[in-house]
Amino acid sequence: MAAVLGGRTHVEVAKVFGVTRQALGRWIKRYREGGRQALKAKRRGRPQGGSLTLKQQRRIAKLVIDHVPDQLKLPFLLWTRAAAAQLIENKLGRHLSIWTVGRYLKRWGFTPQRPMRRAFEQSPLEVQRWLEEEYPRIREQAVSEKAEIFWGDEMGLRSDHPWGRTYGQRGITPVVIARGERFRCNMISALTNRGSLFFMIFEKRFKADIFLGFVCRLVRQVKSKVNLIVDHHPVHHSSKVERWLQKHQANLCLFFLPPYSPELNPDEYLNQDVKSNAAGRCQARDKQHMMSNLRQYLRGRQRQPQLVKKYFQAQKVKYAV
């Protein structure tokens, strides 16, 4: 600045200091508008973002943890950067860009995740009661009767189940050739806390006869008494099943999970595993081919009980053996 103010031309000063005339022009403009203070070097790189106080940050983070957007009268279903930005504007009167909000969310320990679905009709008190009272009672009964606890569930599988991801060239969406014909089959399974797995693949609609056929096979193969925990599917409450249970109380006893609580059943994680890794990633030619693939995949799980135990770890509810 001293050289320019001393009368030298911009070209001469730029050549002496090894800078461009454009950069020198910008510096002179800043000096004339803000003095020497305007020429101070600024921090480079991505801005660290925001001007919220620590108290304000804790308030917003707690609202995000304890509520869904709809409860705070926000027009969003899930928490996104835009939803958090709208929350900050509503509660604090501060307008922040979504990039700044994203840096705040990362700083608070939030990451984008696929949410779990939970039914509105589920009763948290009933779930807590089942975990603290009902399941310990089932476990004690199994110990006194030398029975084994099984977790059962049913599901349907379709040939057009969504695939996972595949590698491809950047900017070019990969294309997978699939059959236009749709077909499906069903599966019923039961697993134990120790990692034993029993299953049955069938084509017909799930009815009482199918369920009774499976439990009869289960009773024949298991030497001890079976305590089977299932959901509230209408078949499990059918009169035909109830009559069978009355005649075979010494062999099998049926227990029920709380309504609308699939996350309590470790067998649901087996279903998810089968859909993602057996049905979703292996293109079947026809129904028989799909059923054969499923049997082969599940037999592999039967030979590796440590893999079955992972369903209990993923379920994040500690069920004692």
Image (cartoon, rainbow, N blue to C red):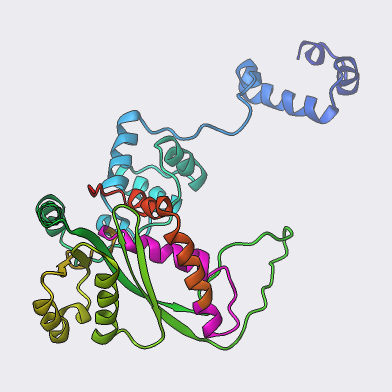
Instruction: Compare residues 318 and 41 and report the one nearer the observer.
Output: 318
Q: Is residue 160 visible?
A: no
Query: Residue 215: where, in percent of width, then height?
Result: 25, 75
Q: Residue at 45% x, 58% y: name it.
A: 303
Instruction: Compare residues 306 and 115 and report the one nearer the observer.
Output: 306
Q: Is residue 282 left or right of residue 155?
A: right
Query: Residue 247: where, in percent of width, then height?
Result: 10, 79
Is residue 68 a member of the stretch shown in magenta? no
Q: Residue at 41% x, 42% y: name it.
A: 110
Q: Residue at 14% x, 52% y: name it.
A: 143
Q: Is residue 83 left or right of residue 31?
A: left
Main secondary structure found in the magenta portion: helix
Q: Is residue 283 above or below residue 81?
A: below
Query: Residue 150: where, in percent of width, then height?
Result: 25, 62
Is residue 266 a member of the stretch shown in magenta? yes
Q: Quadrant of the N terminus?
A: top right
Query: Residue 279: where, in percent of width, then height?
Result: 51, 71
Q: Is residue 321 left or right of residue 307?
A: left
Q: Is residue 180 above or below residue 259?
A: below
Instruction: Compare residues 2 and 194 and report the one nearer the observer.
Output: 194
Q: Is residue 158 left or right of residue 4?
A: left
How many numbered marks are there?
A: 0
Task: Tell me which segment is drawn in magenta.
Answer: 264-291
Q: Residue at 24% x, 71% y: name it.
A: 219
